[in-house]
Amino acid sequence: MNANTPVQFVITQREQDMLIGGQRVPAISGRRFETRNPATGELLANVARGGVEDVDRAVKVAREALGGPWSRMKPAERQAIMLRLADLIEENWDELAMLDTLDLGAPLSRTRLGKVRSGALLRYYAGQATLISGETLSNSAPGDVLSHTLKEPIGVVAAINPWNGPIGMSVWKSGPVLATGCTLVMKPAEQTPLSALRFAELCLDAGVPEGVINVVTGMGDAGAALSSHPDVDKIAFTGSTGVGQKIIEAAAPTMKRVTVELGGKSPNIVFADADLEKAVPAAANAVFANAGQICSAGTRLFVESSIHDEFMDHLVEHTRTIRVGDPLDPETQIGPVVSQAQMERILSFIDGAESEGASPLLGGTRKAGEGYDAGYFIEPTIFGDVTDGMTIAREEIFGPVLSAFSFDTTEEVIGRANATSFGLGSGVWTRDLATAHRVARGIKAGSVWVNCYQMLDPGVPFGGYKMSGFGRESGPHHIEEYLETKAVWINLD
Ligand code: NAP
Ligand code: MG
């Protein structure tokens, strides 16, 4: 398969059904929704629109699977299946990458890179499967009493996913489920349902028993049905802060375990002593990669005042060289944003910034002309004269729009960087060790990247402070979120 492969060879079924209990099934209501290519507007597939009754069916199947052969498998057996899955995902990566490129509009140059990360994630979680253990704990109870803990799978997990990295998200949500022996009902975003369905088929091919990984495609109402379903034990949500709040409320009556990975407005701080040859392209990539549709995007750029103007000149010059265009062209670096609604939302933030007195140094418009008019392309946009109170300085835009500020002191910039309700990512560029450590300690965010940005690794936790959510994904902390701890007391007297 290459960039010229016609769509019909990748999406062989125009009618895409859900995957529940190992079977591809339509919605009980028979309803469907369309998924389209945001670069061209072309219809990709009519997808089953799961509703409350389909969620119910999938949760029942996931509950049954929890008590089936899956529950009797040894950790090493689950591990072997996961290692096979990692191999299968890599073998089929060209297809998975193409599905996301068509559905989301992310360029092939980006989706192809996900192969290494997804393979590594699955192998990391496969390793974790055999490391889950309780502890023997000392106690001071009278008599001779032994106490130890058992780690048990939390049960039926519902994953509710956003659209900005579909196949990576399917892998990230499934890894801890498979490692711990839980079962899963996953609802991909309505804009990007296709790769999750193919992923679930590959799980079956790898030997994951039927009913362990289920995919219900649909809209927000399917997500809402999962979050309030009495037989779901845990919700793993990634998405917007607003929907995250609704999910926490919906989960409260049945006391579900909840982890929420939400939005951000992440600061990226460049000190005058930084290596500017590295910091300039990294600052652009931090905000423009995936057309700005990354939760931890470095959307607030703070540049020390003595180098501010020079830095901004270089940044604009560099950003002009970024290739925006057809996601199927391997040279393209930035594709369209995911939908017309998203494009309009981003453009309205840009208009709002202009009416609040900011003016773009670069971009600020939809990209027009041949090859662009049918899609939702936005020029990478840089505002160089933003003040802290402006709407674009505070709200998550989730598009290729950068707000830049200047600062004078370390203490000042830490305060301004933290003056946000979010706390997901952050960047610091300096050659001074003390400055790097002070800022890393001072920033209230789940990740601080020093002289780099958006580093992720299966072994290192990722997640939010404040309104960017709670819970950590990746690393040993992630596994804990899928386990219950039981204390066992044995009176030996
Ligand atoms: P979203 O609107 O919150 O949607 C996320 C998922 O929730 C979708 O599957 C959506 O279904 C579903 N949903 C909608 N309403 C629901 C409800 N009432 N109850 C339960 N589920 C519901 O987010 P998005 O627009 O897809 O993604 C962009 C957002 O995600 C940004 O804010 C971004 O920062 C955040 N994000 C965070 C991370 C992270 O790790 N922190 C990673 C990626 C994205 P529909 O698709 O049908 O609406
Ligand atoms: Mg789509």
Image (cartoon, helix red, strand yellow):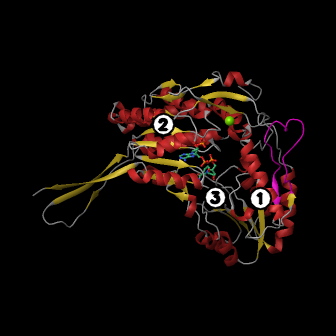
Give the structural element (helix, strand or loop) at label 1. Answer: strand
**Which dot marks residue 402?**
1
Q: Where is residue 306 in the image (x, y as percent from the top left)?
A: 82, 74
Residue 381 inside the magenta-drawn segment: yes
Q: Decide if ligand 1 comes within 8 Å of the CB at mark 3.
A: yes
Give the structural element (helix, strand or loop) at label 3. Answer: loop
Task: Quadrant for the C terminus, please.
Answer: bottom left
What's the CA distance linking mark 3 and mark 1?
13 Å
Q: What are the residue bounds of the magenta stretch? A: 362-382
Within 10 angstroms of label 3, few (less than 14), some, or many (20 or more) residues? Answer: many
Question: Which residue occupies 65% across, 75% down?
Answer: 415
Please, is residue 16 above or below residue 298 in the view?
above
Question: Which residue occupies 64% across, 37% down?
Answer: 192
Q: Which amino acid does label 1 sit on?
A: Leu
1 and 2 marks in contact (CB < 8 Å) = no
Residue 487 inside the magenta-drawn segment: no
Please tell me which of labels 2 and 3 falls first in the chain.
Answer: 2
Residue 333 falls in which quadrant of the image? Answer: top right
Q: Which amino acid does label 2 sit on?
A: Val
Q: Mark 2 points at which residue?
A: 52
